Image: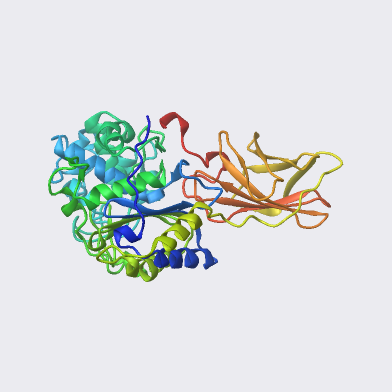
Amino acid sequence: MSVRPLPTSTPSAEGVDATGVHALLDALEAAPDIEPHSLMVLRHGKVVACGWWAPYTADRLHLLYSLSKSFTATAAAFAVAEGLLRLDDTVISYFPEFDADITDPRSRAMLVRHVTTMASGHEAETHDRALAADREEPVRGFLLLPPDRDPGTVFAYNQPTTYTLAAIVQRVTGQSLTDYLRPRLFDPLGIGDVAWVADRTGRQLGFSGLHATTDAIARLGQLYLRGGVWEGERLLPEGWVEEATRPHIRNSDEGGWADWRQGYGFQFWMSRHGYRGDGAYGQYCLVLPEQDAVVAFTGDTEQMQAVLDLVWEHLLPAFGAAPLSGREAADTALAERMSRLALPPAAGKAATLKETAVFTPYDGGCEGLPKLTAVEVDEEGRSLTLVEDGRRLELRFGEPGWTVTEGPVPAAVSGGWTDEDTLVLDVALLETPHHVDLSCSLTDRTFTAKWRTQPLHSSRIRAMCAPRDSA
C-alpha cells in the first residue's frame, strides 16, 4: 500500500525554536554511549523536524523491543470496543482448558486489567520461570506461578503479563496482532509494512518483537495525543486514551531512573513530562500533551534515561506558545542538517589480499556469538562472509563510509585495515538496534567478535531482521 505522508511545517511556524532541536542533536551526537538512529518531532500535528543517521533510513523497519507493548494495548482497545474483551474478566476465563491446572486463588483472581497494567501480583519478572514451567504454552506457565501478592496491589515489569494480554487478543479475534491491527490501526493511520516476531505457538509476542518505521511510531503517538481520533475519525473508543495514559499502579521503587518511577498505565509509562511507550536500547514514542507534541526516536544505547534527560533539557524549552517570526534561516539550517545526519564510520583502509582469507574464532573471542564459526574475506577486500551455524551470510565492505547490503539480513559495514595485519569492521544490523564489532588478525588467521549491545531475542546474526513471513 502507498503510505500517506504526514503533514509538514517549519519549526518556527509551529512555535518551535530550531536552536533547541540543534542543541538536542549536538547532545545526542556528543554522548559517547548514545547512538541515535532516527528522530521525528511533531508539533500541532505536523512534522517540524525529522532525520535518520546514515546508514539508517526512513523506510527501514526497526526492531522496537518493548515499544511493541503500546501497540498491543492498542489492539486490546479495539477488542474491548468490539465486545470481544472485557478488562474486568479473569484471565483464566479466556483459557478454560487450563482451569483444572490453575489452583492458586491469586492466579485465578487475576484480571485482564491486571496484566494490562503490569500488576499481576508478582514482585519480579517471571519470563524465564514461565517458560520453564511450560515452554509449549507460556500462558499456562505464567498462570502456574502463584503471585506473591494480590493482583492489582504491586507493580513488576513482567513480560508474561503483556504476552498473556496479546494471547487473549489473538484468541478472541482469531487473528494475529498485525492482521487484526491492519484495518483498524495501520491502514487508517497510513502505516505501511510492519512485522512482528512470533513464538513456537504461532502467536506474535506482544511484549516485544514488532518491527516498524519511525514514522509508524510518530503516528501512534499522534493518535494518542488526539485522544484516539485521526483526521476527524474516532478510531479508539471514547475514554480509552485517558485510561491508558494515567497511572494505574505505583512504581516508585522501580530502579533509580526518574522517568521509570512516575507510574504505569495500559502498557504506557508515565514520564516527568507526558507519557511514553519505550523499548530496550532507546526506542521511544514520547507524547507531550502540554506541548501538543510527539517525539519519535530510535537508537542503540543502554543509557535510556540519558536520552530522556537530553530531550527534557534541550527540546522542551524550544516549544513556544506562538509562531516565531524571522526564523527562516534557522529553519532552513536545521532541515539541511537533518537531511545529512550520519553515524561516523569505523576507521580503516581498503586493501587487497593474495587470496581469500579464512579466519576462525580466537579462543574466547566470540562473546555472545557462539554459533559464529568462521569469517571469510575475499582477495579483493570487498566481500565479507560470516559463517554461522553452517550458514553463510555475505556482506559487502571496503567502500568509503558505510557499505549497505540488502538481503535476508540487511546490514551496513564500515571500517577496514588498521595496519597490515588487522582488519577491524563495524557491522550494523539495520533492522535492529544492534552492531557486531569484528576484528580479524591476518597473522594467525583468527577473529574476535562481540555484540555492542546484547540482543534480547536471539544471539544469532541471522535472526537480526524483521520476520519476512509476517511483513
Residue 284 found in image quarter: bottom left
Report whether residue 350 is seen: yes
Which is more toward the observer, 19 or 288? 19
Relative side of 345 to 43, left or right: right
Q: Residue at the spot x=68%, y=42% of the render? A: 373
Q: Is residue 260 above or below residue 386?
A: below
Labels in figure, total:
0
Residue 412 found in image quarter: top right
Q: Residue at the spot x=63%, y=55% of the render? A: 345
Query: x, y percentage for residue 153?
Result: 19, 60
Q: Is residue 152 above or below residue 172?
A: below
Report whether residue 110 is seen: no
Q: Residue at the spot x=49%, y=55% of the render? A: 336
Query: x, y percentage for residue 321?
Result: 24, 66
What kind of colouring is applied to the model shown?
rainbow
Relative side of 5 to 347, left or right: left
Q: Quadrant of the N terminus?
A: top left
Query: x, y percentage for residue 59?
Result: 46, 41
Which is more toward the observer, 159 or 437? 437
Query: x, y percentage for residue 78?
Result: 20, 38
Q: Quadrant of the C terminus?
A: top left
User: Outermost residue, front direction?
Assistant: 326
Which is more toward the observer, 103 or 269? 269
